[in-house]
Amino acid sequence: MIGESNAITRKATLTLNISEFDVPPMQDMLIVGRKAPIGPEAVRRMAEALSPEQFTLIKMEHPKIEAVLLRSSLLQMIDEKLLMSIILEEAERMISESMVLRSELKIAMSVKREVDLL
Amino acid sequence: MNISEIMTTTVSTITSDKSVSFAAEKMNAYSTDALVVVDHGELMGVVTSRQLRSTHPNRIVADAMNVLPIRISPEDDVWETHALLQEHDDELLLVMNEEELVGVVTREDVQLKVAEFIDPLTGLYRAPYIQYMGEKLLRKGKPFHMLFIDVNDFGKINKRYGHPFGDDVIRMFSAALSEWQSNGDTYLCRYAGDEFVLITTASDEWVKECMETIDKPTPINDVMVSAAVGHLDGFREPDFFDKPLREHIARASLLSTKAKMNKESMQL
């Protein structure tokens, strides 16, 4: 028998962390594993809904990677084949079939020119 | 036998944005192994239970479905569909009337129907198959060669070596004949006991080579086996398209009897 002095009290503590939602939340690139919980088409639809016409999905034949979602503007700056070979070379070191990796990818151009003096 | 005779007109559908786990539940609820994917009235593809098993349950149907399923017409025949399925691993075929989905047919439906027309001893099709294919070519106005092939002295082989040996002869002879139907324009059946019918739209040279090969006695388990061939040339036969297939088969069979008698008189 539980007496009044032994009454149980239950309390809940609520913690609220508010921060700004990044739009789009996937930065510049998503690399989708073959057995990842989200497939390429879902990723494409998500990107299209959040940032219409800004991302391109590239499907590929690779043992672990099924597709790469890439900010389209990057493809205007650098050749797709070259870019993909760099991305795959680096990503395949850490990705597993069940993972989705996100990545920031910035391209900076450095130019040094020599001109004849008058 | 047309696809319309075996197709299912009740089609279970799903939208491409549903999860794979939802699709699996729906398949269980409808006791089906495949769903047709339709978005806003537009046909997107097909998803099968086999595809669901190899896909993460959280993925959406769009990432599991086959976007290019085989599309066939209700008028297509089951034998051609069966041949098509040998080249693809699709489990569900869409039956389309031009752009409209009118039904579906499963690999199993096609296999079961075709099995009804397969001769258990040889694995070749039976007579109704050649009847169908021949009539179809006649309807389309496509001329063809017909070979009626009759194994020589099969009764004597049975009496001398026993029926199980006779069965071996038929099996091995059929296997040799079936090598001639690999080019896609040739249809073969075991018409009855020791008789076979081959229909082909191939060239005269091909037919000549085929007949010469069949005509040559071949050793089967140390017994020389030969066959008489009756050749009906639909490319040159007068009024070929005005006569029913039954009449062509009768004529080709008489030509094989004549060929057999000629050979016997030459041997005498």
Image: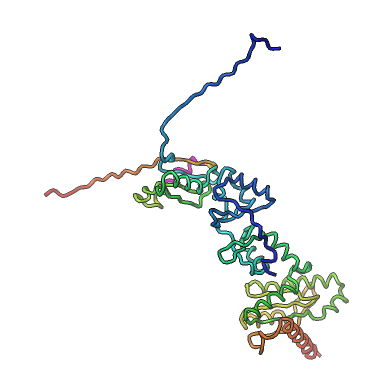
Q: Nearer the viewer, residue A88 or B13?
A: B13
Question: In this picture, is A27 found above or below A76?
Answer: above
Task: Name the magenta segment's main secondary structure.
Answer: helix
Residue at 77% x, 88% y: name it. Answer: B258
Span colored in magenta: A86-95
Residue A41: percent from the left, percent from the top? 50, 49
In the rendered structure, the answer to whether residue A92 lies left or right of residue B53 reads left
Residue B35: percent from the left, percent from the top? 62, 53
Residue B81 is a magenta residue: no
The picture quadrant where one finds residue B193 is bottom right
Question: In this picture, is B193 found above or below A10?
Answer: below
Residue A23: percent from the left, percent from the top? 41, 39
Asked whether residue B173 appears in the rendered view, the answer is: no
Asked whether residue A22 appears in the rendered view, the answer is: yes
Residue at 66% x, 75% y: name it. Answer: B186
Give the quarter of the figure containing the N terminus of chain B. bottom right
Q: Nearer the viewer, residue B232 or B14?
A: B14
Question: In this picture, is A3 found above or below B150?
Answer: above
Q: Nearer the viewer, residue B59 or B159?
A: B59
Residue B167: percent from the left, percent from the top? 81, 71
Residue at 49% x, 40% y: name it. Answer: A94
Give the quarter of the figure containing the C terminus of chain B. bottom right
